[in-house]
Amino acid sequence: MELPRIFATAELAALGVGANTIRTLVRGGRLIRLRRGGYAWPADCGPDDVLRSADPIPEPTCRASDDPASDPGWARQPEPLPEKGTRAAPSLDMDAPLPVDPEAVVALPGEALGPGCYAPGEAELQHLKEIVATAREIDEGTLFCQVSAGVLHGLPLPPGSLGLVHLLRPGSGSGHRTRRAFHHRARITARDRTKIAGLPSTGLARTAVDLARTLSFRDGLAVVDAALARGVRKEELLSRLTRHPGNLRARALIELGNRRSESPGESRCRATMALAGIPEPVCQFKIVLRSGRVVWADYGWPDLGLVGEFDGLTKYGRLLKPGETATRAIGRERRRETEIRDTGVWVTRWITNDCYDLDQFRRGFNDAARAATSFRAA
């Protein structure tokens, strides 16, 4: 995925784009204002495309005989760009890859691009632009952390969690918040550092632990499962649980984590099971049908003769294949359920809304367990 090129006001001035033209381009949607003094081109075009399409507006200039200080109506000329090498700035190696497929930006938001790595949605892409803009100004040794590092690593993050950029500097004491970012302070070791597309970030394991401490139980498990699916070991996560608020929850999430979870929704549903006191299931439970064909259920409780499926927003919603009608998908899945029940196993299903009422979820599971017992006894 190509990172957006960010321009400062002075750099745009060097391209012949003055203050009035910038305002016109922003109003017309041909230039994106990220924050004060930072701009990016839309994803589908570059500077040349935008400048060719712009209607140039003459920029007011100061005559030698005029005193700009005495007439606020005159526009000040932009300060010259610093000579190359005179301003220390992080080196952004834009050729280094992000941990997502180059086609990520055209995949459905949240779609799996590989084990534990998911396509960014609009919020993630906007946050990525903010990260790149902020990277121009951070000091040596500062890392992107928490949800910002989660975006860089392609971890599944909950809607609404992407506000300000999060930065981590070595040291102790409380952090602080500015208009643009949350600034955290903590001990940083060499193993906690990495670079993604040239951007300094906390490593995958450190990021997963930080998010497990700060996100909700459901969202934290989705992150931990994704990190485990990417090859991080539980021991590696547990070793990072130094004294820190949120460690008890993070430890519980790490112990519950399972690399076999195939989607953030499955992980959040499994977290609901834990919160509701439901026995931990076998993830990706293998079932051999009478025909000899092997199928997999999202969850299995072999002692109960019960398997469960998480469908997403709507029942059977995740099963719809490209070009397939909902009626055909439902019919196909019902035939699959019949074949599973022919092996003596009962099937129950959940959707996203089921996961936010613990009492109802618990009752639904108990009803399914009783149905499985009656089914086996029949």
Image: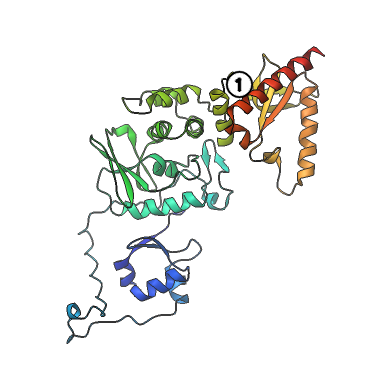
Quadrant location of the C terminus?
A: top right
Residue visible at 33% across and 48% down? 181
- Of 310 and 261, nearer the camera is 310
* Residue 296 horizontal side relative to residue 122, left or right: right
Residue 230 to residue 254: above or below: below
Side of 26 where 360 appears, left or right: right
Q: In this view, does 326 lie above or below 204?
A: below
- Residue occupying the far front of the picture: 359
Quadrant assignment, res 329: top right
Characterize the local packing of mark 1: few (<14), some (14-19) or many (20 or more) Cα atoms within 10 angstroms. Answer: some
* Residue occupying image coordinates x 35% and y 63%: 7
Quadrant of the rendered structure where residue 372 is? top right
Mark 1, residue position: 281
Q: Where is residue 256 in the image (x, y as percent from the top left)?
A: 50, 23
Residue at the right extreme? 378
Residue 205 at x, y percent in the picture: 40, 32
Locate residue 5, reporting x and y percent: 40, 59
User: Which residue occupies the foreground of this view, 61 or 118?
Assistant: 61
Which amino acid type is marked by label 1?
Pro
